[in-house]
């Protein structure tokens, strides 16, 4: 595996280095001789590598033209990381926060780079043995369990875990109606199915809410199964930990899944040696001691939520608020995800 590398900045997503330099100077940080590159793979917030002589930071800011402000609140994300890093060191360390939009057009923050490799797409650039894959699956689950073991109240991390699942179902249903551009009956069908099956409360933990392979940073040299960082905390909060596990299952494509779903894989989760979704859930239950029965609901919700997120991005593309051509086919992705959720609900198995 090779470390994740930044590239040239995409058109329309450039940063004003003069203003950034002035702000860095006000923060007593190196500000001269700035260069900028962009990490190109993210679908939501924009992430850049900023370098100055003797210094380097990762800058995170919202996407250009987004109308979903609460989902791209960089100040909130930075405040979470400031509290989370001391108790969960895999979360990045924040260096500085800019709450004013005047500097770069939106609030942003700087964090220390997390050096390592990130697995993206259906196949890694360098092959992994079945043994390495299985060890990686185990590390994936253990990292999620470790996060959920954090005493979030003692760390000062906030959230409203009571009634969390109901609020999520209702909230993402509203977001679907706000972002929809075409009729997709399967989305409406799974939203109704979820609303009629809200499970009882099962405790609270601090949850990542987007836990998948391409948000993990791995050690490509000493041990490709060792997690050295966890990225993208924009949706993290205190809530039902099974919702976090469900999100992981929603991204976890298996070898036997339909080919259309495999094309949406966010990581190489169906390589030889990989856990199945059922094995992943069982291992989480074993390590955490939590009851993982009833995971079908959480899996279907994860597919539904991802379909809505994809639709939000697709709408921004159709409205010309982003010119990233990766998003041109996202309308089909919405249909594939919603159909997968409906089929899982119908067969009663995730």
Image (spheres, rainbow, N blue to C red):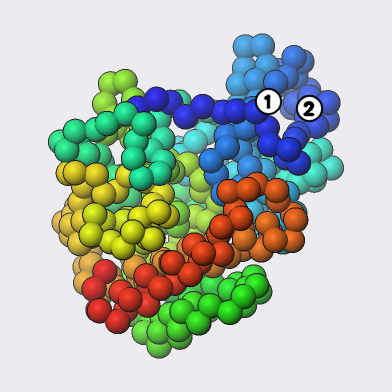
Q: Of callouts 1 and 2, which one flags the residue occurring earlier in the amino acid sequence?
A: 2
Horizontal side, residue 52 vs residue 350: left or right: right
Quadrant position of the N terminus in the picture = top left
Q: Is residue 136 above or below residue 209?
A: above
| Residue 231 in view (yes/no) | yes
Q: Is residue 40 left or right of residue 202?
A: right
- Residue drawn at x 31%, y 63% is 258
State the residue at coordinates (51%, 45%): 232
Foreground of the two, 64 or 316 = 316
Q: Nearer the viewer, residue 216 or 109?
A: 216
* Residue situated in front as seen by the camera: 213 or 292: 213
User: How far across and down, in percent of the image, does residue 61 sit?
Assistant: 67, 43
Mark 2, Cα crowd under 10 Å, few <14 / some 14-19 / many 20+, is: some
- Check disc 2 and report its element: helix, strand or loop: helix
Residue under label 1: 36
* CB under 8 Å between discs 1 and 2: yes
Q: Residue at x 23, y 67 (%)?
A: 292
Relative to 78, 139 lies left or right: left
Q: In terms of depth relative to the viewer, which is nearer, 5 or 211?
A: 5
Mark identifier at residue 123: none
Furthest residue in direction top, as rendered? 53
Q: Position of residue 62 (x, y in %)?
A: 67, 48
Where residue 339 sits: x, y (%)?
A: 41, 73
Q: Which residue is mark 2?
A: 17
In the image, residue 5 sits, relative to residue 157, either above or below, namely above
State the residue at coordinates (58%, 48%). Answer: 326
Quadrant containing the C terminus is: bottom left
Q: CA distance from mark 1 to mark 2?
A: 8 Å
- Circle 1 — which element? strand
């Amino acid at each position: 595996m090779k470390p994740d590398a930044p590239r040239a900045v995409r058109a329309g997503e450039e940063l004003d280095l003069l203003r950034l330099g002035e702000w860095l100077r006000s923060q007593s940080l190196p500000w001269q001789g700035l260069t900028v590159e962009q990490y190109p793979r993210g679908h939501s917030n924009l992430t850049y590598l900023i370098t100055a002589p003797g210094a380097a930071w990762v800058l995170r800011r919202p996407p250009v033209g987004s109308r979903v402000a609460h989902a791209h609140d960089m100040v909130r994300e930075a405040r979470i990381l400031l509290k989370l890093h001391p108790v969960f060191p895999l979360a990045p360390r924040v260096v500085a926060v800019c709450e004013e939009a005047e500097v770069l057009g939106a609030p942003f923050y700087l964090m220390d780079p997390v050096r390592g490799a990130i697995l993206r797409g259906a196949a890694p650039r360098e092959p992994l043995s079945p043994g390495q894959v299985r060890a990686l699956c185990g590390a994936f689950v253990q990292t999620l369990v470790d996060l959920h073991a954090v005493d979030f109240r003692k760390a000062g991390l906030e959230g409203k875990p009571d009634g969390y699942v109901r609020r999520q179902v209702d909230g993402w249903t509203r977001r679907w109606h706000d972002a929809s551009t075409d009729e997709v009956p399967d989305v409406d069908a799974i939203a109704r199915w979820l609303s009629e099956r809200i499970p009882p409360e099962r405790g609270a933990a601090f949850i990542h809410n987007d836990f998948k392979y391409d948000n993990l940073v791995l050690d490509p040299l000493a041990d490709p199964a060792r997690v050295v960082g966890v990225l993208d905390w924009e949706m993290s909060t205190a809530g039902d930990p099974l919702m976090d596990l469900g999100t992981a299952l929603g991204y976890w494509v298996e070898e036997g899944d339909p080919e259309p779903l495999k094309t949406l894989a966010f990581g190489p989760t169906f390589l030889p040696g990989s856990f199945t979704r059922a094995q992943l859930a069982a291992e989480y239950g074993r390590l955490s001691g939590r009851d993982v029965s009833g995971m079908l609901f959480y899996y279907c919700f994860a597919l539904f939520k991802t379909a809505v997120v994809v639709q939000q991005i697709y709408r921004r593309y159709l409205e010309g608020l982003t010119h990233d051509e990766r998003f041109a086919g996202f309308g089909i992705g919405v249909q594939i995800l919603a159909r997968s959720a409906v089929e899982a609900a119908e067969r009663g198995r995730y």
